[in-house]
Image: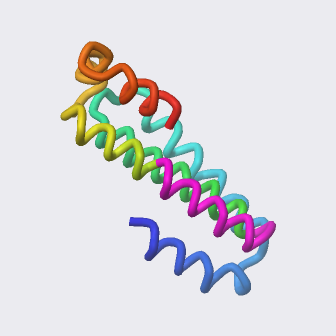
Amino acid sequence: QKIAPMSLIFLTMNNLSTPIFLLMGLLSSLVGGWGGLNQTQTRKIMAYSSIAHLGWMATISSIMTNILIMNLLIYLIMTTSVFLSLIISKSKTIQDTTSTWTLSPTLTIIMLLS
């Protein structure tokens, strides 16, 4: 989900000006943040989170490419752990995650920290 947008950012970051990248990143972060506020399904929350993180990565790309790659790796590790936790707990909504504490407190803590 991130490879195609990241390759487009890498290809266009030298051709576009810094203010355009910063504006694109700001708008993407705002849309992702505001869109995810009122969601209860974890898939929609993760989709809006992906939109917001893409905005942060576009903003970072105008500053330093090395930090962009590090940010992408951290994002991939975090989302992988969250998705694996949601798959293990079989949670589809936020309400489903409230019952994971009784099944596995360790999994709930890992999900919280991720």
Q: Examine the rendered structure and indicate whether residue 43 appears above or below residue 3.
A: above
Whether residue 73 is in magenta: the answer is yes
Quadrant in the rendering for residue 95: top left
Dividing the image into 4 quarters, which one contains the N terminus? bottom left
For residue 12, side relative to residue 32 (left or right): right
How are the colours assigned in the image?
A: rainbow
In the image, what residue occupies the spot 66% across and 51% down? 26
Q: Examine the rendered structure and indicate whether residue 59 appears above or below residue 6.
A: above
Residue 41: x and y in percent read 27, 33
In the image, what residue occupies the spot 73% across and 84% down? 14
Quadrant in the rendering for residue 4: bottom left
Q: Examine the rendered structure and indicate whether residue 3 appears above or below residue 49.
A: below
For residue 110, side relative to residue 87 (left or right): right
Quadrant in the rendering for residue 56: bottom right
Near-viewer residue (53 or 72): 72
Please identify the dominant SS of the magenta region: helix
Residue 108: x and y in percent read 38, 25
Near-viewer residue (98 or 49): 98
Whether residue 74 is in magenta: the answer is yes
Q: Tell me the magenta residue range.
A: 62-78
Number of marks drawn? 0
Residue 13: x and y in percent read 69, 79
Residue 114: x and y in percent read 50, 37
In the image, what residue occupies the spot 29% across and 42% down? 43
Near-viewer residue (112 or 64): 112
For residue 48, side relative to residue 42 (left or right): right
